[in-house]
Image (spheres, rainbow, N blue to C red):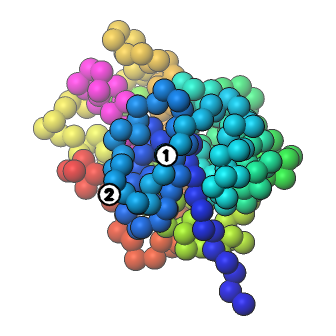
Amino acid sequence: MSEQLFKSFAIIGAGPNTGIHIVKAFLAIGAPILVIARPASTNVAALPADDPNLTVVRADYTSASEISTVLREYKVDVLISTVTLVFGGVVGQTVLADAAKEAGVKLFVPSEFGIKPQLAKGGLAFQKTDFAVYAKSIGLPTLRVFNGLFYEFVPWLTALADTGKFHIVNKGETSGSFTAVSDVAGYVAHILTTQPPSRLLDVEIQIEGQRATLSEIGALYKGRAPVVYCDHLPTEGVVNAHFRTFFQKHIEAGGGSCGWNPVTESDDAESASRDNSLWEGHHWLTVSEALAQ
């Protein structure tokens, strides 16, 4: 007898960066999706209100009992989180995890989307690792999705959006994983609706749209913006310049690849896209294709 697929899905944090794209990906394949929005959120205004597969409810993200009530009412199998630091971030996900566990949710997809977190304590990266440990401690199965860096993230990372120049710290010659937001969103919707639960429970997914270096991506901006090599990003007019510099150095050390092993601090390039095959026949956008959109 074939394994029964997940049937009901909910998302918390349907903001403009990742969440809204995941919602639209579900709707594009005709899969029902429940959006749990904050009471004051205006992000849902960008969603197609007339789509019969879309349901929007509002709830307090800090109330496990309130979230749990919604999840039970709609008999949610899978809860996806794309919460940001602005509203409690990954630390606040413990409340969502408690609610999901109490409501009988079968799978929790935490707000991991990006590079693999480091193991050193402190900062956002470790908070993601810490949350994974917490979810396991309460017996809540998770699916962690690592996609490297979003193409759309590059203008921020290089201070291009702030200065009009594409800044590369040091040489920018280490390859990393880059994936379009639309590909990540479509992938999540696809595997959750087509893969048997046994393939997804307590699993770390690694996907990669294109393997590239920052120098290679910078070359694609030729004619659009000057490329500047530097020791650190300029601080004038660039918020969190020190963090962005640190982030680029982490990429240069190999941490931008989905094949990165934070324990051995080494990169297995062949494993970076090991789970792309779960979306058979899909054309993954390249950096140049994403820029052309």
- Magenta span: 148-166
The reply, left or right, for residue 216 in relation to residue 175 is left
Label 2 – label 1 distance at C-alpha: 33 Å
Label 2: few (<14), some (14–19) or many (≥20) C-alpha neighbours in 10 Å: some
Of the two numbered discs 2 and 1 in the rendering, the one whose residue sits closer to the viewer: 1
Residue drawn at x 42%, y 67% is 30
Q: Quadrant for residue 45, please give it.
A: top left
Where does label 2 land, which residue?
Answer: 286
The reply, left or right, for residue 258 in relation to residue 168 is right
Q: Is residue 122 above or below residue 213?
A: above
Residue drawn at x 57%, y 26% is 87
Question: How far across and how far down the image is residue 33, in percent?
Answer: 50, 56
What kind of residue is marked 2?
Thr
Marking on residue 213: none
Where does label 1 land, which residue?
Answer: 56
What kind of residue is marked 1?
Val
Badge 1 marks a residue whose secondary structure is: strand
Badge 2 marks a residue whose secondary structure is: loop
Q: Is residue 202 visible?
A: yes
Q: Pick the residue in front: 31 or 72.
A: 72
Q: Pick the residue in front: 31 or 135.
A: 31
Residue drawn at x 71%, y 52% is 72
